[in-house]
Every structure is written in C-alpha cells, then in structure tokens.
Amino acid sequence: MAQQPLPALSLLQTRVLGVLVEKQHTVPDTYPLSLNALVAGCNQKTSRDPVMNVSEAEVQTAVDNLKYLSLVMEGAGSRVTRYEHNVGRVLQLPPQSVAILAMLMLRGPQTAGELRISCERLHKFSDISSVEVFLHELNDRVAGALVVELPRRPGERENRWTQLLSGAPAAQAASQAPAAAGGETPALHERVSVLEQEVEALKALLAQLITQK
C-alpha cells in the first residue's frame, strides 16, 4: 500500500516531534512525555534553532493535529496523559533516519558532520559517510523526499541539509522570516496559525452542540 503524502507541518509541530524523538533517548525514564514536559522541551533555550516561547495551549493544539496524522499517540498506563511519537512507523523509517530528522527539526539546517555530532545521543554514526548514506536515502524516497541538500553558501566548505516536513526550504524561510510590512515575528506567525486552528475547532464543537439540541 502506497504511503499518502503528509501535509506540510508547522514549525511548532515539527518542534513537538523533534522533542519527542530526542527525549525518548535522552530521558527514557520520563518518556512518554507529559504536556508540561513537552512544553518545556519546545521552549528549551539550548540546542534549539529557532528558540521558541510557546504556551501549553499552543503545544496541545499541535499535538492534537499530529495525533490526527498518527504521528503522535497517547501513551497508556498513566494517570497523567502522556505523548509519544510514531514517526518511524508512519514514515516507514529506520531509527537512524528518525534521529537525523529529529535533529534537523530541532536545530535547523546542518552539514553531515554537524548531524553526526548532534545525533550522538540518539544514534552513534561511525563516520560522516554513514550519515550521508541515510541523508541520501531520505532524499531519494519513492514516497517523497524528507530532506534536501541546500546550495553551498559563500565561504562554506560543506553543504547543509534541511528537513522537508515543514515544506520546501523557501516556504520554511518565508514562514520564519519577519514580514517587512507588518513587522510580524516568527513567534507571532506561529501563534496566529495556532489561534486559527483553535477557532476552527471551536466552530466544529459549537456546530456539534447545536445539532445535539
């Protein structure tokens, strides 16, 4: 059965997925994560690019949308609702590829050498060449590329790679850059997107309540 292409995810949705993959390996005793732990991971100041400042409600909305896509699931056996990722199964990827995607979602574009270092706690690649093998596999997927190699910038010795779960690189840059006319910041752009999703959810709930009367 052919995989259905995923819709482009928001910056916050990819941050949520990256945090879940990361914490599964770095703090296994507290994984799956509670909503509070997930918010803390999204707002973490170190090893994040860009740094975010999102609310619990915004993260909950992102989680709900990811649950709809089966990329996130609720963990069982806990009084507090906890969440775990389902990236490998949904996208049919090995752990090495999931680790690479997670680091690209958390830290932005990186070279193969940088990815080898940043993935250290998720998967230990023997050398840079082994990282490149998985990058090219992610790029050459029949179901659709999940990463792309970026053009080398002036002064750089190596090409960087970026993830495509948030759409093409140009679309990612547009969604993260401040708007020249309105002075819109990335955080504001993300907040507006989340609020729009919440409004649509409330409309659906209201329509359901009216129907039940």
Image (cartoon, rainbow, N blue to C red):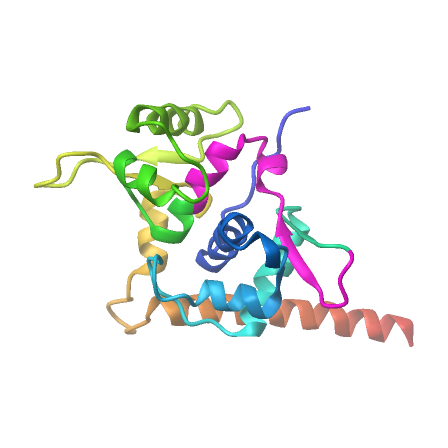
Say whether residue 82 is magenta: yes
Residue at image point 43% right, 68% down: 43
**Tally of numbered discs:** 0
Q: Can residue 197 be seen in this snapshot?
A: no
Image location (x, y in percent) of residue 145: 44, 31
Work out whether 67 lies above or below 190.
above
Say whether residue 54 is magenta: no
Quadrant in which the N terminus appears? top right
Q: Nearer the viewer, residue 26 or 111?
A: 26
Image location (x, y in percent) of residue 175: 36, 58
Work out whether 69 lies above or below 189.
above
Residue at image point 46% right, 56% down: 15
Q: Can residue 172 be seen in this snapshot?
A: yes
Q: Nearer the viewer, residue 114 or 4?
A: 114
In magenta, the rendered stretch is 77-102
Q: Which residue lies most toward the right here? A: 213
Image location (x, y in percent) of residue 35: 61, 67
Work out whether 93 lies above or below 38.
above
Image location (x, y in percent) of residue 155: 8, 41
Left or right of 148 on screen, residue 66: right
Quadrant in which the C terminus appears? bottom right
